[in-house]
Image (cartoon, rainbow, N blue to C red):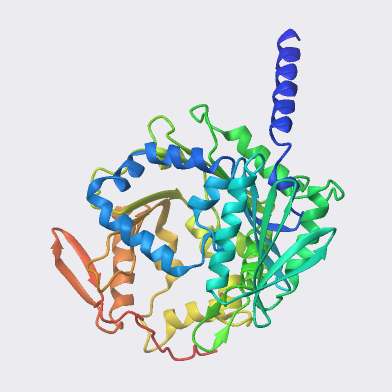
Amino acid sequence: MRVGLLGLLGFVVLGLAEVQAQQRFSAQWLPSDTTVWISIADPQHLAQSWNETQFGKLLASEALAPFRKALQQHWASQRQGVFGTALSWEQIGQMAAGEVALAVLGSEQAAAQVALIDYQGKPAEAQKALRELRRRMAQAGTQLQTEQVAQAQLQHYLRGRRELLAYFFHDEVLCLIRSSQRTPQHSRTVAQQILLRLRGQEKRTLAADPDFQKVLADLRQHRSAQVAEIHLRWFARPLATIAALGQFHQWELGEDESLDWSAALAKTGFDQIRAIAGEVSLNVPGYDVWHLVRIYAPRPWKGAMNILALQNRSWVLQAPQPWLSAQVASYTAFDLNVQQAFENVGPIFDEVVGQGKQGTWEESLEAIAKSERGPKVDVRRELVAHLDSQCLVLGSPAVDEEDDRPRRIVVLKILNPEKNEPIVKSAIDRYHKPERGAKLRKDLVAGVEIWERPLEDPAGFEAEFDEPEP
């Protein structure tokens, strides 16, 4: 009992300390419908810690000086700044005395990007950054308008009727707001929402949101003892984020048809991913960067969500296979119930490829298996049924400067290879034979057969199969 009381007392003390440390905390200033939140507790310390990593030292080396100069010139030419604020990270770091947070608010109807900078005790630096902001916006040919919102001055930078940026100050916090072109007046609403929370007049905050609390508590629970400091935190609601960012970018499928990805994914079950969050730490013993990610998706799952049939197996944490080349650009290992994942592809395939027509997935599989002009491969029976759960995804560097497309190799283990490998090989050979330009290579790797498609065919092969007979 004594140990239990001591543990409880320690938990209470640590909890109070964390609350006190977060008295000026951006999650308390943002509304509960925030879809993306990125928080840097101390930008200058983050930069210092990054410079101490091996990769940071490499970028700071004399050998990469031309690269750094070209990158700085590129950033300067863009004139966009961090998150569209027209301020550079260096300027933000100089004025920030506390946290810097970036966020996305809203939905597919109205959305805004927000930057919150706590400059408490550094008003001179804040005014200097503001003067630079005004100078750059004036060079861009904008007009400055001021209006009162919730007893604060909201400054709007306009080009014609289009708002490029808005900002306000309160309690030594600078808030910059960039609304989407579809809802240019939304910044007024966002400013009012944040001002009410800065003044403690509204309790429905991101910090009080149950999903936010759940996933951040989960991160604390699984935090490694090796991690001494968190340099960056982030939180996102995946489908709400897609919908909100759709206000700033056009998500398209093909050339003529647009697709509402957030609606399609929600309809097929992916709305069960309630939240994702992560913590990034630099200079963790043995690592340059340590990134812990937690996903909050309460079971039971339904629909295409079951594609994510991942399993916790110890082999995933083992060292890479000895046959892997040192030139591999990336290495990802995961344990996937391939059969379960395959059987749940249908809903998302029907929604995206079939444009909502149910049965498109099964019709496609039947065409591949039975069409006279098709490969006559039963994908479910001849391929998927014989695959183990051990999966590797390897990335390779670009072949040359003219063709910089990413290349991925997916490695799947075969169950009972002595029996099943001939079945899988036959299916793969038959699947590739109808493909335009594909050829079987036996000269690339000794003892290994590789099907190759010419690089000059970036679109790949699209087989036209006969409709399956009823």
Total number of numbered labels?
0
Look at the image and tell me whether residue 234 can be seen.
Answer: no
- Residue 217 on image: x %, y %: 67, 38
Q: Is residue 354 left or right of residue 328?
A: right
Judge by depth and name the residue closer to the eye, 10 or 104.
Answer: 104
Tell me which corner region of the image, top left, top right, bottom left or bottom right, holds residue 102: bottom right
Tell me which corner region of the image, top left, top right, bottom left or bottom right, holds residue 11: top right
Q: Is residue 32 left or right of residue 104?
A: right
Look at the image and tell me whether residue 389 can be seen.
Answer: yes
- Residue 62 on image: x %, y %: 24, 47
Q: Judge whether 226 appears above or below 297 on screen.
A: above
- Residue 200 on image: x %, y %: 84, 46
- Residue 238 on image: x %, y %: 63, 60
Picture quarter with the N terminus? top right
Residue lying at the far top of the rendered structure: 2
Determine the residue positioned at 33% across, 71% down. 427
Picture quarter with the C terminus? bottom right
Q: Judge whether 331 appears above or below 359 on screen.
A: above
Q: Judge whether 6 appears above or below 417 on screen.
A: above
Determine the residue positioned at 53% across, 46% down. 94
Determine the residue positioned at 43% across, 71% down. 379
